Image (cartoon, grey):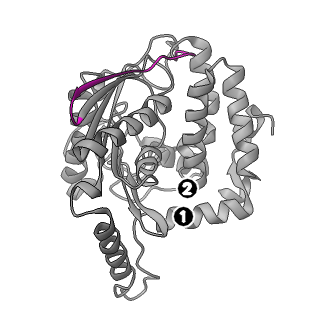
Amino acid sequence: MESQVKRFAAATLENKVAGALRSAGASEASLLAATRAMLHASMVGVDSHGVRLTEHYCQMLAGGRLNKDPQLDVELRASGSAMVHGDDGLGHYAAYKAVEVGIELARKAGVGAVGINHSSHLGAAGAYALAGAEQGFITFATTNTDSMVALFDGAARFHGTNPLAFAAPVPDAKPWLLDMATSSIPMNRVLLHRSLGLELPEGVAADAQGLPVTDPDHVDMLLPLGGADYGYKGAGLAGVATLFSALLTGTTLDSDFIPMYGGDDVSTPRNMGHFVMVIDPDKFVGREIFGMMMTRYLANLRAAPVRPGGERVMAPGDREWETVARRTAEGVPVDPDTARFLGL
């Protein structure tokens, strides 16, 4: 699909996205956080959570669902835990703040666990895990989302796509980065196959009765990671995201969310919860030894034998950093609707 869209330099997109959010009334601090997170997603190839979301956020700012000038409140609960009140603003702002708070806690306590409440959609969870890793900390970030994924053997939507993102620093190299949804595929993949008239792979989506289907026109819900045979694994991991993001923060369960899309209500805040955990290697084995072991681990991983027909073994993050390099050189692909909205 990338060949069918126009490409733009990251700096151009950054200016356009920030300008659009600024025109929609977003405060400078919150719009810079949102722009940073969306550019991260677009650069690493997670286009569903990239600059294409600018128009949606602008609509929610105009409708009143998103607070244009959120005043974040940080409440320290213990030596290694805190809560960030997002004041119903752009979720990216609260999430980056949680990483900052987590780092400060981890410097003292070794681990900083930060819950976030009264927030909103935060985009790609990997942006926040990466933010901690880039400062030398192991970081975990997660959120629960709108129900669209069945349980294992279930016949109704229950969990959201509920991402789990982890990142760790690597000496003299890009961080190790794992950012994964707990559904088999994103809903955007279904929409893409529907528009192209292509069949879906088996075991990734289901009809309204929860039965696996490959015809995208018959899809009512997604299946959890692992599909029809091993989906109990993905369903369990989705519950991990809900446990940390909703239960531990006292926010909204997946099935109780006001839908992100498709509803008439664009004024009521969604009270989303997120969770960030930051770990300081210095308070465990030590930063130097951890870095040495991380380097050795990745070297061994990448040198592992390749199965017949395989290309090479890759570590989490390798594909993303290659995408960043390619898009830095060639430009970031942007769909026509988003390009028109941004005035490109």
Q: Circle 1 — which element? A: helix
User: What type is the residue that disc 1 sits on?
Assistant: Trp
Percent coordinates x, y for residue 268 in the rendering: 45, 11
For the residue labelled by badge 2, is the local secondary structure a helix, a strand or a loop? helix
Q: In which quarter of the image is the N terminus?
A: bottom right
Residues in magenta?
A: 66-80
Residue that extends furthest to the right in the rendered view of this protein: 344
Quarter of the view holding residue 109: top left
Q: Which mark is residue 153?
A: none
Q: Mark 2–mark 1 contact, CB under 8 Å?
A: yes
Can residue 198 be found in the magenta stretch?
no
Residue 44: give its label. 2
Is residue 72 shown in magenta?
yes
From the viewer's perspective, is residue 160 above or below residue 272? below
> How far across and down, in percent of the image, does residue 276 sit?
32, 39
Main SS, magenta region, reads: loop
Q: Is residue 334 something that shows in the picture?
A: yes
Residue to which mark 1 is pinned = 321
Residue 159, x across and y down, in percent: 29, 36
Q: Which of 8 and 236 is in front in this view?
A: 8
Q: Nearer the viewer, residue 94 or 185?
A: 94
Number of other residues with Cα within 10 Å of mark 2, as a class: few under 14, some 14 to 19, many 20 or more: many
Image height of 176 relative to 22, above or below: below
